[in-house]
Image (spheres, rainbow, N blue to C red):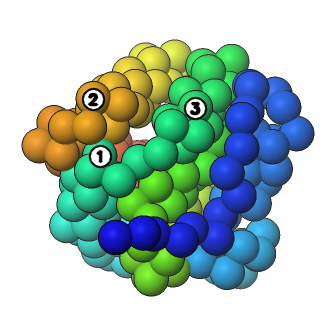
């Protein structure tokens, strides 16, 4: 079975125009536009989106592990490197985080899934980017969890990819619940 993916395949390096383009385009991956919500999402909606992520992201990572092409693994590795470099810039880090999730979704080879799910991680990330809340421990945790997802994809292990993604969403949910209790600075 052959899978056609409309997202561009490429060789990327951190800071390259393609990594920066992915990070810039990340907010609305379903339409590939860079529009942002005009009003902040309510805490209840954000928690519902995390629930959607908990249901879908592990399955997406698992599917991607069975289909991922080498160029997507290279792209994901470049995004991880760029995220490490952007740890002190919450906005850039957030855009790269969104691009990471977008790339994993595209790595499934399922355009319909990318369209249906693509904007969900972006919406939850857009909840914390404006808060500028990104300490070194949080950034290190996100990068480490993304690296675990990448390693599982690279080993073509769907069970490990599922587990790594579930751990990542669980961490994101805990962080979101804590941040919703703290007013923005």
Callout 3 secondary element: helix
Task: Assign the N terminus to one quadrant of the image.
Answer: bottom left
Residue that label 3 marks: 74
The residue that appears at 46% across and 25% down in the rendered structure is 143
Inter-mark Cα distance, 2 to 3: 13 Å
Callout 1 secondary element: helix
Label 3 environment density (alpha carbons within 10 Å; few <14, some 14–19, many ≥20): some
Indicate whether 120 appears above or below 137. below
Labelled disc at residue 181: none
Q: Please name whichever residue, 46 or 110, is drawn nearer the observer in this view of the structure.
A: 110
Q: Please name whichever residue, 55 or 51, is drawn nearer the observer in this view of the structure.
A: 55
Indicate whether 157 appears above or below 23. above
Inter-mark Cα distance, 1 to 3: 14 Å
Labelled disc at residue 155: 2
The residue that appears at 42% across and 69% down in the rendered structure is 2
Residue that label 1 marks: 65
Residue 85, image x, y percentages = 68, 18
């Amino acid at each position: 079975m052959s899978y056609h993916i409309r997202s561009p395949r490429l060789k990327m390096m951190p800071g390259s125009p393609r990594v920066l383009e992915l990070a810039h385009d990340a907010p609305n991956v379903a339409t590939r536009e860079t529009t942002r919500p005009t009003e902040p999402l309510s805490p209840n909606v954000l928690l519902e989106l995390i629930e959607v992520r908990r249901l879908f992201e592990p399955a997406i990572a698992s599917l991607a592990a069975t289909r991922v092409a080498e160029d997507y693994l290279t792209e994901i590795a470049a995004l991880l490197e760029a995220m490490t470099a952007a740890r002190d810039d919450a906005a850039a880090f957030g855009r790269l985080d969104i691009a990471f999730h977008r790339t994993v979704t595209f790595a499934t080879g399922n355009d319909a899934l990318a369209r249906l799910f693509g904007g969900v991680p972006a919406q939850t990330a857009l909840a914390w980017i404006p808060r500028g809340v990104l300490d070194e421990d949080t950034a290190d945790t996100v990068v480490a969890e993304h690296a675990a997802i990448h390693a599982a994809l690279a080993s073509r292990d769907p069970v490990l990819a599922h587990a790594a993604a579930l751990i990542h969403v669980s961490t994101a949910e805990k962080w979101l619940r804590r941040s919703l209790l703290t007013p923005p600075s």
